[in-house]
């Protein structure tokens, strides 16, 4: 009897298990979702082929076939884990490999993705591929971080251009020191690219004899230089993009203290994409139709004409001989430029003569205490009279700004009201344009503290604050007061300048800080436009000036000292993220840039010693910039990318912070999505906005901590988004 009872129980268990299997497994319909792969948030479905049931990942028109044991993975959610053996064929790599017994159905085609795995296109997807022109090469991606990527469509739309390995100084010549006769004395740096691997052929050559310093390099930004040899660095995933490569000596134990350095600006060969379509996602990159050999920007002629979204501003102090009148720039997204013929499109920056003429000490020549004593004593009417002479010629100027360095926006003197009294001349004379003071905004956030000490300074609470206005802010955050002393000065300005220049290659928090300060400024003063205050050169604090040697067309050899230029990926990111605010203000010295090293401006020095040569400018104060200016093309590419989605930027919908799944499977949620906490924890910054009828969503994704030569993928709202190095992805996803 006991044996019969045991057999009876075993039969019941078997029948119950079989019943559960019939209920769960034998009844799934073709295409039914049977689970989810957590790292990509993609569905796993049943594909029925006769008496076989395959596991597929994706949708029914674009999918990868997986092994049955895919269902047993720890990173898979499924009610079918106990019954995976009833599905067809286990495969290697814990189910990630394609099963060999799967037969591609009629009406479908098999394609190979960038990492070599096979995926299936069916229906309309297959028709699009078979009827399209021969597809271009898929972008290279970093597959070491993610074991399997979502299948990529091979359809690429947009007018693309092929680029060769190039850069400034010219790659073929290397970075050289010259003799007095113009011949090469020493080649310090020569970059080589072989099969997507970047190497420095002269890495073992030293250009600093001080053994207290060690040689390293930066590609883009980094928290400190990489002191490994610059050899065989994989840059293949950045094909078609530009990179900044800086070799530098930093003091041992004080990696922020940099001395000798050289910078090369390079283009990685491959297709430069205008737009890049992957499934329902459209990426917006760079619309340039050509890249010239000139040191000057190309966007004046290579970009199509376009207009900004409503209410946005792009102000240039920069001017090029490619566009003497400013007309090309203003047809390509620039609102105000200092060489514009139309005064309503003209920008003008005053360099403090009205203060100096009233006896103000020169900027940075004395302490703030001395400046404040002068401000306490000066006659306010004198200041007003002097400032009236600034306003007079600029009543119709589109954008007037003050340098204001002798006093500075950090000043806390109670006598600042005298400045506000002088600024009333703007209303008295009925000035019509925008008005800004360099770097002035209602609150200010220390980027040095933000980056150096990982200190959000209470700004996370402010970002979450739902209030609006000066008084409401001061009541909500009495311990984090605004610049109240600047009250009547703030009344005069129409612009808040936020973010500020890049000061170091270690400024990986630049974009996070910009968005924090910008969004908070808009909360406190919603009536004023918040513009990113930027410069295309790096305003180095702890770096010596770099040294170069050049020769004129007549063979005259001279030295110059320069600052590094901002990496192109940061410039592009500035262009993108500033459009979530109200735009940008690009400062530059007032000289018009020309591609002629004979016109060295005021920079040339004798070959030996520190004596400067006589200034040499061309017509209309033209001079040679010595550093590549192509990063400005990338700035405007970022502006263009956002402008192509102006319907979403103009829509009456809020900015949102979506949850993000990282390559390692972690999910970024809650406050960690905000720019303050995202930076401190090393997470990407992702924001999104919907159009008015919620059919399309625009995402921008940036990761300042990501190496500039690597491509990574995130999962956002169930969509895979790839980030190319330290460039910002502008992605429109159609629902």
Image (spheres, grey):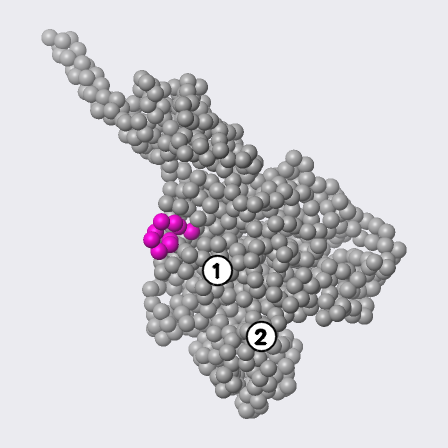
Is residue 695 shown in magenta?
A: yes
Check whether the beta carbons of the residues at disc 2 and disc 1 lie within 8 A of each other.
no
User: At 80% from the left edge and 64% from the top edge, which residue is drawn?
Assistant: 605
Along the viewing direction, whichever of 636 and 589 lies nearer the viewer: 636
User: At 44% from the left edge and 48% from the top edge, which residue is drawn?
Assistant: 732
User: At 35% from the left edge and 34% from the top edge, which residue is drawn?
Assistant: 43
Q: Is residue 114 above or below residue 495?
A: above
Does residue 72 appear anywhere in the picture?
no
The magenta region covers 690-698
Label 2 sits on residue: 343
Q: Is residue 707 above or below residue 504?
A: above
> Of marks 2 and 1, which one's residue comes earlier in the chain?
2
Can you tell which mark lies on residue 508?
none
Dot 2: few (<14), some (14–19), or many (≥20) neighbours within 10 Å? some
Label 1 sits on residue: 579
- The picture places residue 668, in percent across and down from the top left corner, at 40, 47
In the picture provided, is 393 more to the left or to the right than 125?
right
Disc 2 or disc 1, which is closer to the eye? 2
Does residue 162 appear anywhere in the picture?
yes
Kind of element beneath mark 1: loop
Quarter of the image with the C terminus is top left
Distance from Cα at disc 2 to Cα at disc 1: 24 Å
In the picture provided, is 288 more to the left or to the right than 618?
left
Q: Is residue 412 above or below residue 540?
A: below
Residue 161, by quadrant, is: top right
In the picture provided, is 227 more to the left or to the right than 147?
right
Quarter of the image with the N terminus is top left
In the picture provided, is 471 more to the left or to the right than 266?
left
- The picture places residue 145, in percent across and down from the top left corner, at 50, 37
- The picture places residue 317, in percent across and down from the top left corner, at 61, 68
């Amino acid at each position: 009897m006991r044996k019969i009872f045991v057999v009876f129980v075993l039969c019941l268990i078997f029948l119950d298990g079989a019943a559960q299997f019939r209920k769960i497994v034998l009844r799934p319909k073709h295409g039914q979702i049977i689970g989810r792969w957590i790292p990509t948030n993609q569905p796993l479905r049943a594909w029925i082929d006769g008496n076989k049931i395959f596991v597929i990942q994706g949708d029914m028109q674009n999918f990868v076939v997986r092994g049955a044991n895919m269902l047993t993975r720890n990173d898979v959610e499924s009610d079918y884990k106990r019954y995976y053996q009833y599905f067809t064929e286990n495969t290697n790599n814990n189910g990630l490999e394609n099963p060999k017994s799967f037969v591609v159905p009629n009406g479908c085609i098999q394609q190979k993705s960038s990492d070599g795995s096979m995926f299936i296109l069916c229906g309309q997807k297959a028709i699009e591929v078979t009827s399209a022109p021969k597809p271009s090469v898929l972008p290279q991606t970093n597959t070491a971080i993610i074991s399997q990527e979502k299948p990529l469509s091979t359809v690429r739309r947009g007018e693309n251009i092929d680029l060769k390995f190039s850069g400034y100084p010219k790659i073929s010549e290397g970075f050289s020191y010259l003799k007095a006769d113009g011949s090469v004395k020493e080649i310090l740096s020569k970059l080589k690219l072989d099969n997507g691997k970047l190497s420095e052929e002269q890495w073992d050559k030293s250009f600093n004899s001080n053994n207290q310093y060690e040689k390293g390099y930066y590609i883009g930004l980094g928290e400190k230089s990489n002191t490994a040899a610059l050899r065989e660095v994989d840059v293949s995933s950045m094909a078609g993009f530009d990179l900044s490569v800086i070799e530098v000596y930093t003091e041992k134990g004080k990696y922020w203290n940099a001395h000798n350095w050289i910078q090369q600006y390079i283009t990685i060969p491959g297709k430069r994409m205008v737009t890049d379509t992957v499934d329902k996602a459209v990426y917006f990159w760079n619309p340039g139709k050509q890249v010239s050999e000139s040191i000057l920007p190309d966007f004046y002629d290579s970009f199509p004409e376009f207009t900004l979204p409503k209410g946005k501003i792009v102000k240039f102090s920069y001017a090029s001989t490619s566009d003497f009148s400013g007309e090309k720039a203003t047809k390509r997204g620039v609102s105000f430029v200092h060489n514009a013929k139309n005064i309503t499109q003209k920008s003008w920056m005053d360099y403090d003569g009205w203060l100096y003429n009233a006896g103000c000490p020169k900027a940075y020549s004395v302490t703030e205490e001395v400046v404040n004593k002068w401000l306490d004593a000066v006659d306010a009417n004198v200041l007003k009279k002097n400032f009236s002479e600034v306003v007079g010629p600029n009543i119709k100027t589109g954008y007037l700004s003050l340098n204001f360095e002798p006093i500075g926006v950090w000043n806390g003197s109670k006598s600042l009201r005298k400045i506000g009294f002088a600024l009333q001349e703007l209303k008295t004379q009925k000035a019509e344009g925008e008005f800004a003071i360099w770097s002035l905004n209602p609150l200010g956030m220390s980027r040095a503290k933000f980056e150096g000490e990982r200190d959000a300074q209470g700004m996370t609470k402010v970002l979450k604050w739902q209030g609006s206005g000066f008084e409401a802010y001061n009541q909500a955050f009495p311990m984090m007061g605004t610049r109240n002393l600047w009250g009547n000065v703030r009344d005069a300005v129409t612009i808040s300048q936020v973010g500020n220049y890049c000061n170091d290659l270690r400024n990986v928090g630049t974009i996070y800080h910009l968005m924090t300060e910008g969004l908070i400024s808009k909360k406190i003063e919603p009536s004023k436009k918040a513009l990113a205050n930027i410069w295309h050169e790096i305003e180095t604090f702890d770096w010596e000036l770099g040294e170069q040697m050049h020769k004129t067309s007549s063979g005259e050899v001279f030295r110059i000292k320069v600052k590094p230029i901002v990496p192109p990926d940061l410039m592009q990111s500035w262009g993108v993220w500033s459009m979530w605010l109200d735009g940008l203000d690009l400062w530059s010295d007032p000289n018009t840039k020309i591609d002629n090293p004979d016109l060295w401006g005021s920079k040339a020095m004798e070959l030996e010693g520190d004596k400067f040569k006589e200034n040499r400018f061309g017509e209309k104060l033209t001079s040679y910039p010595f550093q590549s200016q192509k990063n400005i093309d990338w700035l405007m590419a970022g502006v263009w990318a956002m402008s192509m989605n102006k319907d979403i930027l103009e829509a009456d919908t809020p900015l949102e912070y979506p949850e993000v799944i990282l390559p390692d499977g972690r999910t970024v949620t809650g406050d960690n999505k905000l720019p303050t906490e995202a930076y401190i924890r090393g997470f990407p910054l992702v924001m999104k906005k919907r159009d008015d009828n919620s059919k399309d969503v625009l995402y921008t994704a940036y990761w300042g901590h990501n190496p500039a030569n690597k491509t990574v993928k995130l999962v956002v709202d169930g969509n895979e988004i790839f980030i190319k190095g330290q460039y910002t992805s502008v992605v429109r996803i159609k629902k």
